[in-house]
Image: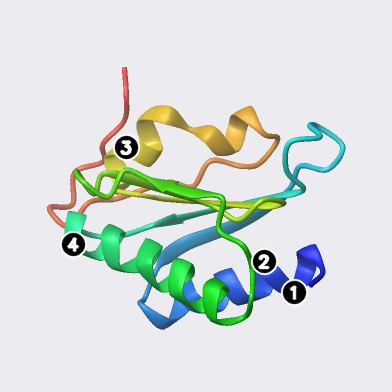
Amino acid sequence: MEVQDIAKLAIEALEDVKGKDIIELDTSKLTSLFQCMIVATGDSNRQVKALANSVHVKLKEAGVDIVGSEGHESGEWVLVDAGDVVVHVMLPAVRDYYDIEALWGGQKPSFLPAGGRPWSAT
């Protein structure tokens, strides 16, 4: 299965569980470890876990080998490694703090929590 097909399936799985701020980054020119990174946000620990599980199940059903998965215990940041496609699902504050999109050449999304006050890492 092609990298684009795996990424498309992962994004569909994230959308099925109402993942937010889904970003797909082409990392093929930046590293040989993986070709594509997908980052998404979940509103709660439970949703973050459900989003990652949705990706895991959908890719597995399509015959994609899952290399590993981490972070299910806390549900703040869960990673699903499908070889050439790596999926990160995070809570908004965690995603804002680590800003991995900027590390890999993407644009940082802006988050406005439900309370209305902007949050940013210092």
Amino acid, disc 3: Val
**In terms of secondary structure, where does tag 2 sit?**
helix
Residue 51 is tagged as: none
Q: Please say which color scheme the image uses.
A: rainbow
Kindly identify which residue carries mark 1.
5
From the image, tell me which residue sits under label 4. Answer: 46
Q: Which residue is mark 3?
A: 94
* Residue under pointer 2: 7
Measured in 3D between alpha carbons, the distance from the residue under mark 4 to the one under mark 2, in whole angstroms, is: 23 Å
Q: Amino acid at mark 1?
A: Asp
Residue in view at x 57 percent, y 69 percent: 10
Circles 4 and 2 in contact, beta carbons < 8 Å: no
Q: Position of residue 52 (x, y in %)?
A: 39, 62
- Number of other residues with Cα within 10 Å of mark 3, as a class: few under 14, some 14 to 19, many 20 or more: some
Going 26% across and 44% down the picture, which residue do you hit?
76
- Marks 2/1: CA distance? 5 Å
Q: Secondary structure at mark 3?
A: helix
